Image (cartoon, rainbow, N blue to C red):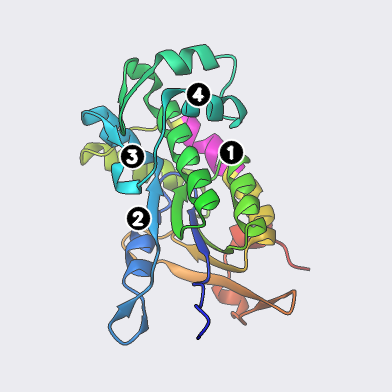
C-alpha cells in the first residue's frame, strides 16, 4: 500500500502600504507558471477590502470559503483579535453585525472597515486550523499580521512574503487620490502616511518569519515594478539573490539593513 503524500501547506502574504501597487504584483504572481500550463496555486484568497465591498453592496457570505461562523463565534474571536479598542468595543462590534446561516450583514455602516478586518482575520485562523492553503493581502500596518504569519509557520506552513514598497508616502497618497477619481475607495491622506511608516517598520520582523521573501519597488508611475530583493531559507539560513547596488531601493536598505 503506497503512502499518501500530503501537499505542502503554503501561505502567501501580499503586503505593502495603501497605494503601493499590490494589485498589479498579485496579478502577475497569479499568472506565474510553475510547470507547463500549471499556474502558481495561491489557494483561497482573503482580502479585507473585498469583504468590505461585499458588505457595502449587500452582505458577505462565508459560503465560498467553506467556513461556518455564528455571531457568538465571531464576537468571541473579536475579543482576542487585537482589533478592538476603546473607540470600537466588543459591544459595538456585536451590535454592528447580523448573521443568518453563512450570510453576514452590517447594521452600522460606520463600522464597515473594522468589521471587514475582523472577518478577514477570522478566516485566516479558520484556514490555519483546518490546514488549508491560502493567501491574504494586507497594508501590514498592524502587528496582528505578524501573529498570523507566526501561527501559520508554527502549524507547518511555508510562509511566502511579497512586499511592495515605494520611496515615499507621497507617492502612495497621489495614487490613492487618483484611484478615488476612478471610482476606487477613499483612504484619508493622514492615515496613508501613518500606515506607510507602520508597514515599513514591520517589514523586517515579517521577513524573519518568512521562508521566502520577495521585495518589489513600485515607486515610478507608468513603469514596471522592480524586484529589489529576494531570499530563500536554506538549512536555516537566508540565501539572498545578488542584486547590483544601483538596482537596490533606498526604502529596503533603510527598513531592512542586512549589514
- Residue 7, horizontal then vertical, whole percent: 49, 72
Secondary structure mostly seen in magenta is helix
* Quarter of the image that includes the C terminus: bottom right
Q: Residue at x 41, y 13 (%)?
A: 95
Q: Secondary structure at mark 3?
A: loop
- Mark found first going from the N terminus, 1 or 3: 3
- For the residue carrying disc 1, how many other residues have a C-alpha within 10 Å: few (<14), some (14-19), or many (20+)? some
Q: Secondary structure at mark 1?
A: loop
Please name the residue that numbered disc 3 is placed on. Answer: 62
Q: Are marks 1 and 3 in contact (CB under 8 Å)?
A: no
Between marks 4 and 1, how big is the CA–CA gap?
20 Å
Q: Secondary structure at mark 2?
A: helix
- For the residue carrying disc 3, how many other residues have a C-alpha within 10 Å: few (<14), some (14-19), or many (20+)? some
Please name the residue that numbered disc 1 is placed on. Answer: 142
Q: Which mark is residue 92?
A: none
Residue 17 vs residue 40: left or right?
right
Between marks 3 and 2, how big is the CA–CA gap?
23 Å
Q: Which is in the foreground here, disc 2 or disc 4?
A: 4
Q: Which is in the foreground here, disc 1 or disc 3?
A: 3
Please name the residue that numbered disc 2 is placed on. Answer: 23
- Mark found first going from the N terminus, 2 or 1: 2
Please name the residue that numbered disc 4 is placed on. Answer: 75
Q: Which is in the foreground here, disc 3 or disc 2?
A: 3
Amino acid at each position: 500500500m503506497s503512502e499518501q503524500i500530503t501537499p505542502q501547506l503554503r501561505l502567501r502574504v501580499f503586503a505593502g502600504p495603501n497605494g503601493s501597487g499590490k494589485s498589479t504584483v498579485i496579478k502577475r504572481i497569479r499568472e506565474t507558471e510553475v510547470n507547463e500550463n500549471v499556474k502558481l496555486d495561491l489557494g483561497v484568497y482573503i482580502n479585507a477590502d473585498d469583504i468590505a465591498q461585499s458588505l457595502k453592496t449587500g452582505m458577505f457570505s462565508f459560503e465560498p470559503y467553506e467556513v461556518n461562523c455564528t455571531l457568538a463565534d465571531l464576537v468571541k474571536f473579536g475579543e482576542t483579535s487585537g482589533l478592538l479598542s476603546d473607540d470600537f468595543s466588543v459591544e459595538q462590534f456585536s451590535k454592528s453585525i447580523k448573521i443568518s446561516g453563512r450570510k453576514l450583514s452590517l447594521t452600522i455602516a460606520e463600522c464597515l472597515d473594522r468589521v471587514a478586518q475582523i472577518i478577514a482575520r477570522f478566516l485566516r485562523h479558520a484556514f490555519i486550523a483546518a490546514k488549508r492553503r491560502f493567501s491574504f493581502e494586507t497594508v501590514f500596518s498592524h502587528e496582528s499580521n505578524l501573529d498570523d504569519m507566526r501561527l501559520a509557520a508554527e502549524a507547518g506552513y511555508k510562509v511566502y512574503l511579497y512586499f511592495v514598497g515605494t520611496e515615499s508616502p507621497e507617492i502612495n497618497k497621489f495614487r490613492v487620490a487618483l484611484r478615488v477619481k476612478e471610482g476606487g475607495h477613499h483612504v484619508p491622506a493622514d492615515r496613508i502616511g501613518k500606515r506607510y511608516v507602520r508597514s515599513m517598520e514591520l517589514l523586517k520582523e515579517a521577513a524573519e518569519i518568512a521562508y521566502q521573501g520577495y521585495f518589489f519597488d513600485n515607486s515610478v508611475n507608468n513603469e514596471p515594478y522592480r524586484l529589489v530583493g529576494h531570499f530563500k531559507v536554506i538549512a536555516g539560513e537566508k540565501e539572498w539573490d545578488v542584486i547590483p547596488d544601483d538596482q537596490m531601493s533606498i526604502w529596503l536598505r533603510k527598513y531592512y539593513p542586512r549589514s
